[in-house]
Amino acid sequence: MNFYILLLIFVLLIAGDKGLTAVNLSIVKDKSPNANPYQIEKNPLARFIFEKIGIAIGSIIYGLISLVTLFIAYFLFKQIFGETIALIIILILYTLVIINNFIWMLKYMGELV
């Protein structure tokens, strides 16, 4: 698969994830101004980055880390399963992450109980 197509797919997946994370943090911050909104982040590395440099720059930096990690995972999966299956695995896993963030967004907004 063409590197630039993979890059586009991965950037879109990461942007969806980081965008929903930013929305979730914003909702929690608005609803509980005295609480640390970064505590909702389950990934300890991402939480550390967000706490140290904020959500905007932290999302960009962690997005770059995620991009590198995603390419490494893709190329490792590609060696084992082949190109198509590797991409399918990445798409399924990241789609589940995005769906999870969306569900949490609805919960934080009070739309789900």
Image: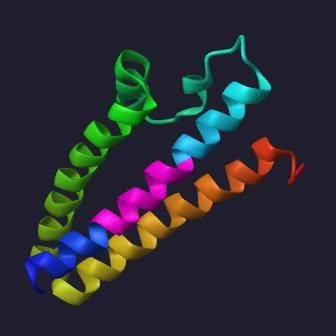
Q: Closest to the observer: 72 or 13? A: 13
Residue 81 found in image quarter:
bottom left
On screen, residue 44 versus residue 39, left or right, reads left
* 80 relative to 22 in the view: left or right: left
Magenta portion: prevailing SS class: helix
Is 62 covered by the magenta stretch?
A: no
20 with respect to 88 (left or right): right
Magenta segment range? 11-20
- The quarter holding residue 48 reads top left
Residue 103 coordinates in the image, percent (x, y): 70, 56
Query: Is residue 16 magenta-colored?
Result: yes
In this picture the colour scheme is rainbow
Task: Give the image location of residue 15, x and y in percent.
Answer: 40, 58
Name which residue lies at 24% across and 59% down: 70
- Counting from the top left corner in percent of width and height, residue 42 is at 52, 35
Residue 31 falls in which quadrant of the image? top right
Front one among 18 and 85:
18
